[in-house]
Image (spheres, rainbow, N blue to C red):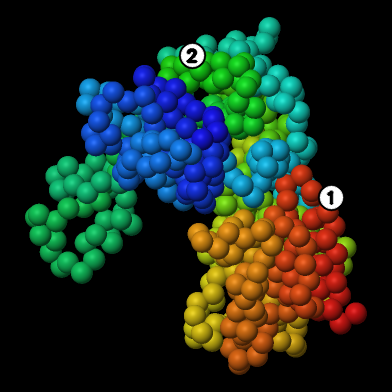
Amino acid sequence: MASSPSTEGPGVTLAWARPDGSPQSGPREWESALLLISGMTASWTDLTVTCNGAPLAVTLRRVGGLVWITAEWPRVNAGQYQLQLQWPDEMLNIRVTVLPIKLTPAQLERLLEDLHAGLPADVALSLQRAGALAGTLVGQVKPATVAEELSRLRRAVLGTEERPPLQVLLQAVQRDPYTALEALSVSVRREYLRRPRPEALVRAVAGHLQPPPTLKLPDERVTRTLDVYENRVVRACVEAIHRRLRHLTALRPELIEATSLQTKLQAARRSAPMLEEVSSLRGPPGRITMVLLRRPDYRALLEVLLELQRSVQVTLDDARLLEPLDNVPALYQTWCTLQVMVALTAACCEAGFSLVSENVLIARPGSLLVRILPGGVPLLVFLHPVSGTRITLTSERPFRRGGGLFRSISFSQRPDLTVEVQRPGTSPELWLLDPKYKLDSDQPGQAGDGRPVKGDIDKMHAYRDAIRTSEGALTVRFAAILYPGRTTEYTPGLAALRAVPGEDQELSPLLVKTFCALLRAAEGS
């Protein structure tokens, strides 16, 4: 057998091979493999091999003319896997990385870079131009360079010549936190009443000619609380720094200084445990109080927050970015969804539509979050001021049998992206797009060549034929898959569109052109 890359353990050598015995560098996405083990002193029958806790079948077999101890590696998605080999008095733990096969390492890196920085900012800018963010106190929405962001966070955590470090400021707040009196409503027996409110007493005794002695009456107590606006500003400052540092380290994990700033931030956060009793500030700080002006510690923390606020960081609100290899198909779908949002907004603005509603942007102190809500929640709603045509973009909208404006005449259908076009006086129409990282033709035993086959396109046919109006009329005008393959148009309104990270110059114009053509047809022009 030809030599193949191996992993050395304590007296054990590991190598990988395909099921036919030919060597390979490691396990591949969606493909089974053989783990070849040599150098064991114990009997192979005493060996136990597990992958993420699941046992693998261990056998002796001849591979490449030699007899090896082999473990059968199953078909898995891309991600990180914990491989454990255990035999009497010995154990070997290895972390195995399975890379995606549909995307090259460069394309995967571009995908993650787009999701971390580029696409969320593009979405925010396009929606801002369409009319979103009106009345929201956000700074200039633009992607900052890594150096600019690192400089801001360094100033926020380590301080400046005029401002102490963050930990010193939080320690000062912890020593003398600002509090306020808060009224609490309690129920007590009549002899313990202290500050009853007349209207509350009337409601409590209503229906009683003679209230029983055991009847509890509403009373009011006053206590001091830390959950006040000024302390929420302090917490918002810490949370803004945390979000932006986490984003920066995820985008550039090799930045040692960013990791060091994270450690210092955690130490500073531990020095102010009183913030655990303070709720989060919703939205940017909208008012300045005397405490924020006159107390140096509170004023300095407000200045840090406002400095971050002047350069808003736009980030994708998706925890799956923290484990990208374990979520490649889901992240690819999100990448496609953001591309569609930018293209649809551009096409609608070009056609004279106005954005009237969005559930995508969330303003936070120092940050602007981009989120994609599934399950039928409208993401974007556009309206034409003259024709009255309404366009709604929805993610994972369900179509079930019976009921509603739209229904499925057979099984439930859930396209990834649905664009509904409702023109006054006419039947509505739907445009459906399905990001598909893994084609149906890529199922085990049916390894495809990256091009959609009958089963993949039949899904689009199923959408077009099954989803109808409540009167039973066909309503899907356009259906397409977005996938890392070649663009192919099968019939007017049925296509497979190439969507590959790093090739936005091809995908974006294609989507805008498609949407513009569909809009012209919908408007009858």
Q: Quadrant of the C terminus?
A: bottom right
- Horizontal side of 448 relative to 411 (left or right) equals right
Q: Is residue 111 above or below residue 450?
A: above
Classify mark 2: helix, strand or loop. Answer: helix
Residue 68: mark in rendering: none
Name of the residue lying farthest toward the right:
525
Tag 1 and tag 2, C-beta contact below 8 Å: no
Q: Which residue is mark 1?
A: 505
Q: Position of residue 188 (x, y in %)?
A: 18, 47
| C-alpha span from label 1 to label 2 | 52 Å
- Horizontal side of 26 relative to 35 (left or right) equals right
Q: Is residue 309 above or below residue 58?
A: above
Mark earlier in primary sequence (1, 2): 2
Q: Position of residue 86 (x, y in %)?
A: 28, 30
Name of the residue lying farthest toward the bottom:
471
- Horizontal side of 77 relative to 334 (left or right) equals left
Q: In which image quadrant can residue 337 be found?
A: bottom right
Classify mark 1: helix, strand or loop. Answer: helix
Of 484 and 508, which appears nearest the observer?
Answer: 484
Residue drawn at (61%, 92%) of the image: 471
Q: Residues within 10 Å of mark 2 (few under 14, many from 20)?
A: some
Q: Which residue is mark 2?
A: 172
Q: Position of residue 50 (x, y in %)?
A: 33, 39
One can see residue 382 in this view: no
Of 248 and 138, which appears nearest the observer?
Answer: 248
Name of the residue lying farthest toward the top:
161
Residue drawn at (43%, 30%) of the image: 14
- Horizontal side of 196 relative to 330 (left or right) equals left
Residue drawn at (76%, 40%) of the image: 141
Amino acid on which the number 2 mark rests in the picture: Ala
Q: In which image quadrant can residue 507 be found?
A: bottom right
